[in-house]
């Protein structure tokens, strides 16, 4: 190895050390670029989190490869990247979206590297080092793409051999309003559309293993408990989640006790529910609402109830789709009241209930089971935290409080960052 080549290798190692120190920021930048450019990858929050994990593990692989001058084909494919490919195959996301994600990811990483290289080296060294980085990252992306395509295709073929996959494709066509003959779709799904339905998104807790048969079995038990007009239609989305429609025949259901029935049956699953809808259009609408509710539940984390209905969260459903912007808006609107600790949580809840009852101390005290004077004291403290009275931006305050209630830590300011 001549002196020039040694200088280039050492420069690449120095860059790797710099990138390793900013691994989280660089990975977040790459993930953001991918999600903003490829809408097909926006399936749900769980897959978004797995995408971020895949990106971070791949960036870490590349940094390790540069730091130790390892050839791409001698690396091991990250488990998060392989699992992400499998999940996309299960959800029917086209392979070209995944391959494009790797190309965009490489492009973003090169931009980050270019910035650091020109800050660290003179023009001649920077040019040579950048050329090496381009060659090495291209080799890595070419190698990892082959690996994830192979995993994707194997999983997709396995998934499609199951009859359930055919039904899932039919259900997705109906959801996309692309089914040419609803009668054929009804026959394939064994589920009539000309009736009332309540759509749901059902998934296992993070600590549970996904069992599709278990989800369907519990859905059937629940349908019997609710006296549905027939068997529910259950369509798996991946190993740990399903869509399900509960049928109620020709009569519009009213106040169906889902939460009570789920608790009585001790069903160990989480549910997000839409409102009742009729016909094929209602079939679509109620599930879209359930999916929105699930997004809020996932953003809420452990603070979300086991059963969440769309009417509960309709006001914050859109806010859950851009949590970074929502967090900034909540903090701007609520100020210190958005701090994530028990004291501020009590103030937020008291103020939320007070405003929901038309600023009635008496009504708020009744719901909170508190003395009227205690409610008044907390409302005054909350107003002090806001730094202003409840004037023209009252609606903004109410919506921000609802976002805090349902989205929890994902939109609150960590208590430790307030010092």
Image: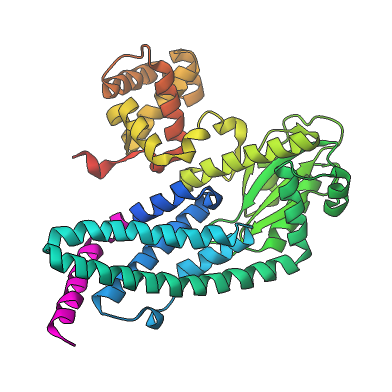
State the residue in front, 73 or 157.
73
Which quarter of the rendered picture does the N terminus lie within? bottom left
* Residue 221 appears anywhere in the view: no
| Magenta run includes residue 15 | yes
Closer to us: 8 or 363: 8
Residue 67 percent coordinates (x, y) = 24, 75
Residue 217 visible at all? yes
Q: Main secondary structure of the magenta part?
A: helix
- From the viewer's perspective, tell me whether residue 232 is left or right of residue 240: right
> Foreground residue, 288 or 178?
178
Q: Give, as a single range, the part of the protein colored magenta.
A: 1-26
Tell me if 186 is positioned left or right of 79 in this view: right
The question of residue 153 being in magenta is answered with no
Q: How many marks?
A: 0
Q: Is residue 87 above or below residue 272?
A: below
x and y percentages locating residue 275 in the rendered image: 69, 33
| Residue at the image point whose x is 62% and y is 70% from the top | 153
């Amino acid at each position: 190895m001549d002196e020039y080549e040694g200088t280039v290798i050492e420069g690449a190692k120095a860059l790797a050390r710099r990138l390793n120190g900013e691994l989280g920021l660089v990975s977040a930048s790459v993930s953001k670029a991918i999600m903003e450019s490829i809408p097909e990858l926006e399936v749900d929050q769980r897959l978004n989190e797995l995408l971020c994990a895949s990106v971070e593990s791949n960036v870490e692989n590349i940094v390790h490869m540069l730091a130790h001058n390892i050839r791409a084909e001698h690396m091991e494919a990250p488990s998060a990247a392989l699992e992400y490919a499998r999940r996309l195959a299960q959800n029917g996301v086209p392979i070209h979206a995944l391959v494009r994600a790797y190309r965009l990811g490489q492009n973003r990483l090169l931009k980050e590297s270019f910035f650091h290289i020109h800050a660290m080296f003179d023009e001649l060294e920077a040019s040579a080092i950048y050329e090496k980085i381009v060659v090495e990252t291209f080799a890595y992306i070419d190698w990892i793409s082959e690996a994830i395509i192979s995993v994707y295709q194997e999983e997709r073929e396995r998934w499609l051999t199951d009859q359930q996959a055919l039904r899932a494709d039919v259900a997705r066509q109906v959801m996309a309003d692309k089914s040419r003959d609803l009668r054929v779709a009804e026959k394939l799904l064994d589920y009539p559309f000309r009736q009332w339905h309540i759509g749901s998104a059902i998934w296992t807790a993070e600590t549970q293993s996904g069992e599709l048969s278990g989800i369907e079995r519990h859905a059937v038990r629940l349908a019997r408990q609710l006296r549905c007009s027939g068997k529910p239609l259950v369509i798996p989305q991946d190993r740990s989640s399903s869509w399900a429609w509960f049928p109620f025949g020709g009569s519009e259901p009213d106040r169906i006790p889902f939460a009570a029935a789920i608790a009585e049956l001790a069903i160990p699953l989480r549910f997000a529910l839409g409102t009742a809808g009729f016909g094929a259009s209602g079939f679509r609408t109620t599930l879209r609402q359930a999916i929105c509710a699930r997004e809020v539940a996932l953003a809420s984390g452990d603070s979300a109830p086991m059963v969440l209905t769309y009417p509960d969260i309709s006001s914050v459903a859109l806010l859950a789709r851009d949590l970074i912007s929502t967090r900034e808006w909540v903090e701007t609107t609520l100020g210190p009241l958005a701090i994530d600790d028990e004291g501020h949580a009590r103030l937020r809840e008291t103020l939320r209930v007070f405003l929901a009852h038309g600023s009635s101390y008496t009504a708020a005290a009744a719901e909170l089971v508190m003395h009227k004077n205690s409610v008044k004291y907390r409302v005054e403290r909350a107003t002090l935290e806001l730094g202003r009275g409840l004037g023209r931006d009252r609606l903004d305050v109410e919506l921000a409080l609802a976002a805090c209630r349902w989205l929890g830590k994902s939109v609150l300011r960590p208590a430790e960052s307030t010092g």
